Image (tube, rainbow, N blue to C red):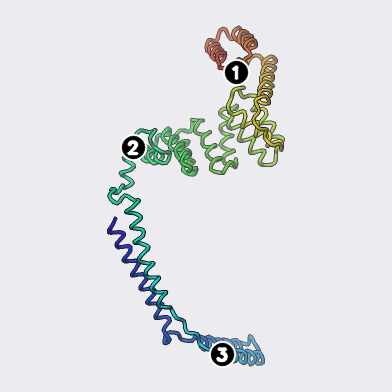
Amino acid sequence: MLTFWVAAGVLTAVAAGLILMRARGAAAPEAAADPAPVLYRRQLAEIDELADRGLIGEAERKSAHAEAARRLLAAADAPKAAWDAGGAGRGAVLLAAVAAPALGLGLYLAFGAPGYPDQPYAQRLAGWRASRLETLSAPEIAAVLRQVTQERPNDAEGMRLLALAEGASDNPAAAVRALRRAVALAPERTDLLRLLGEGLVYQAGGEVEAEAQDVFRQVLAREPGDPAARFYLAQAKVAEGRQAEGAAELKALLADLPADDERRPALLAAIARAEGRAPAPPSQGGQMDVIRGMVEGLAAKLEANPDDPEGWVRLVRSYSVLGETARRDAALKTARARYADRPEIVKQLEDAARAAPMR
């Protein structure tokens, strides 16, 4: 490294010296030829050529000749100002050229690590692969996974993990490429298709463009109630100017989410924007009113159409989260009796009844 800095300083000084020598030569009196006569003689020749081709008349040629001649005489009579490079200026430039690398070398010796060995990328990558995952940054994890997926190019799960690492490294284009490969390797996996749609939205800066919409429609064709696909397709309608339709779909999605779903605040804000309102600031009382309204709507829906095991599980969980133990127990008793011959549903109901209340 010291050799590098010495060589850099010498080369910088030599380059500065060559530049100043050329500048001095250009400033010499014999080198300072006046270009004005050549310029005006060329102008006169062009005037004659235009006249010979019939593009200007004889009177115009004479007038142009006279004007060019006047300019030539004025340029010839003008005093010549000789350019001086200035000896003091040359010394300052040479001094700066030598001082810059010397200063850089001094700073490197003071704050750098001249004795530290080189770390080629391959060596660093091998070190990352041997390290514990929690000690690595997102770009380092992505680098490791790029190598792993090159070794196992047909591993769809590896491509999914690579996409997540690329996204965490703020590299959405690479994340989308990995997800496309993952979907191609495992086209039956809806979770990969959903991730691809979300990656396309991320890459587009939050816009749900045509390709992302097509991906989310494929997700809905496989899983008709998928919340992510419904949300983004509704957002696309709002962006296209179909605010009322988009807001209605967002409200329908809100009604289907459990009362304790962490996506509800973002969904409420999206509904407000779709309706042209400013999203309400978080308010415990306001949130509780909205949640209770949704739970009441779900209870009414089950009363009209009780053959909905998932709905009963959501209702029991919602009452438990709200701390309404009496209504939770009543809903649990009704649902247990209805699905007594389906132990897997009874187990889900009992788990929902144990949900911790909101604080």
Q: Determine the residue positioned at 58% across, 31% down.
A: 228
Q: Earlier in the sequence, mark 1 or mark 2?
A: 2
Residue at the disc numbered 2: 129
Is label 3 in a helix, a strand or a loop? Answer: helix
Q: Determine the residue positioned at 42% across, 32% down.
A: 157
Q: Is 306 located above or below residue 212 in the figure?
A: above
Is label 1 in a helix, a strand or a loop? Answer: helix
**Circle 3 Cα neighbour tier, 10 Å, few/some/many (<14 / 14–19 / ≥20):** some
Q: Earlier in the sequence, mark 1 or mark 3?
A: 3
The answer to whether residue 70 of the structure is visible from this angle is yes
Mark 1 and mark 2: Cα distance apart in space: 44 Å
Q: Quadrant of residue 283?
A: top right
Image quarter in which the N terminus is found: bottom left
Q: Nearer the viewer, mark 1 or mark 2?
A: 1
Residue 321 image label: 1
The answer to whether residue 180 of the structure is visible from this angle is no
Viewed as shown, does residue 230 lie left or right of 243?
A: left
Image coordinates of residue 312 in percent, x first then y, are 61, 15
Mark 3 and mark 2: Cα distance apart in space: 76 Å
Q: Are marks 1 and 2 in contact (CB under 8 Å)?
A: no
Amino acid on which the number 3 mark rests in the picture:
Leu
Amino acid on which the number 1 mark rests in the picture:
Val
Image coordinates of residue 229 in percent, x first then y, are 59, 32
Name the residue nearer the viewer: 39 or 114.
114
Residue at the disc numbered 3: 72
**Circle 2 Cα neighbour tier, 10 Å, few/some/many (<14 / 14–19 / ≥20):** some
Q: Determine the residue positioned at 37% across, 77% down.
A: 21
Mark 1 and mark 3: Cα distance apart in space: 96 Å
